[in-house]
Image (spheres, helix red, strand yellow):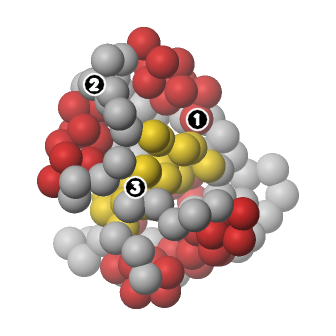
């Protein structure tokens, strides 16, 4: 009900393995982060892999928006840049696919494709497939 199914951990593990990553930044929403962290603590899938979870600020809509589906590519870009100011670069950035559910090109609510994030931050960025909360 919180937008994160425990079966997504296997998909996440596959993404991390395919990129041979050891230091991962996962961007989430305030709604999903506590659920994800709880499931992660109970999992034995990620031995030797550091996963940091950060919540991007919704700069476009502002206010108290807490649903990740309303984040834009620029919100993710700014969150990654903020992270890099305080931390070494991760091997991989993982973001949920739900904010990029417009059309086959995976566009956000402004029509920007998710690949703009990778080009802007010069880090590998992948989508973790998940269903949008709204349709």
Can residue 102 be seen here? The reply is no
Q: Which residue is mark 2?
A: 45
Q: Where 92 sits versus 66, above or below?
A: below
- Structural distance between the alpha carbons of marks 3 and 1: 13 Å
Instruction: Indicate which disc, 3 or 2, sits on the residue closer to the N terminus.
Output: 2
Instruction: Indicate which disc, 2 or 1, sits on the residue closer to the N terminus.
Output: 1
Q: Which residue is mark 3?
A: 94
- From the viewer's side, name the closer residue of 60 and 13: 13
Decide: few, some or many residues near mark 1? Use Cα within 10 Å; few <14, some 14-19, many ≥20: some
Instruction: Indicate which disc, 3 or 1, sits on the residue closer to the N terminus.
Output: 1
| Residue 70 marker | none
Decide: few, some or many residues near mark 2? Use Cα within 10 Å; few <14, some 14-19, many ≥20: few
SS at circle 3: strand
Question: In the image, what residue occupies the spot 22% across and 54% down?
Answer: 20
- Structural distance between the alpha carbons of marks 2 and 1: 18 Å
Question: In the image, what residue occupies the spot 41% across and 74% down?
Answer: 123
Disc tally is 3
- From the viewer's side, name the closer residue of 10 and 61: 10
Question: In the image, what residue occupies the spot 61% across and 27% down?
Answer: 34
Displayed quadrant of residue 31: top right
Question: In the image, what residue occupies the spot 42% across and 50% down?
Answer: 23
Where does residue 39 sit, x and y in percent of width and height? 44, 20
Q: Is residue 42 left or right of residue 83?
A: left
- From the viewer's side, name the closer residue of 65 and 30: 30
| Residue 33 marker | 1
Where does residue 85 sit, x and y in percent of width and height? 71, 71
Displayed quadrant of residue 32: top right
Where does residue 74 sit, x and y in percent of width and height? 58, 78
Q: Is residue 65 left or right of residue 77?
A: right
Where does residue 58 sit, x and y in percent of width and height? 70, 62
């Amino acid at each position: 009900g919180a937008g994160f199914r425990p079966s997504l951990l296997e998909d996440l593990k596959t993404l991390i393995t395919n990129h041979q990553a050891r230091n991962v930044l996962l961007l989430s929403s305030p709604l999903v982060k506590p659920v994800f962290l709880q499931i992660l603590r109970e999992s034995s899938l990620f031995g030797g892999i550091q996963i940091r979870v950060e919540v991007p600020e919704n700069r476009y809509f502002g206010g108290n928006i807490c649903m990740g589906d309303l984040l834009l590519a620029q919100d993710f870009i700014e969150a990654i840049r903020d992270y890099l100011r305080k931390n070494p670069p991760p091997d991989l950035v993982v973001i949920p696919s739900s904010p990029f559910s417009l059309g086959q090109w995976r566009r956000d609510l402004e029509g920007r494709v998710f690949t703009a994030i990778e080009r802007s931050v010069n880090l590998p960025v992948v989508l973790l497939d998940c269903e949008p909360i709204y349709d």
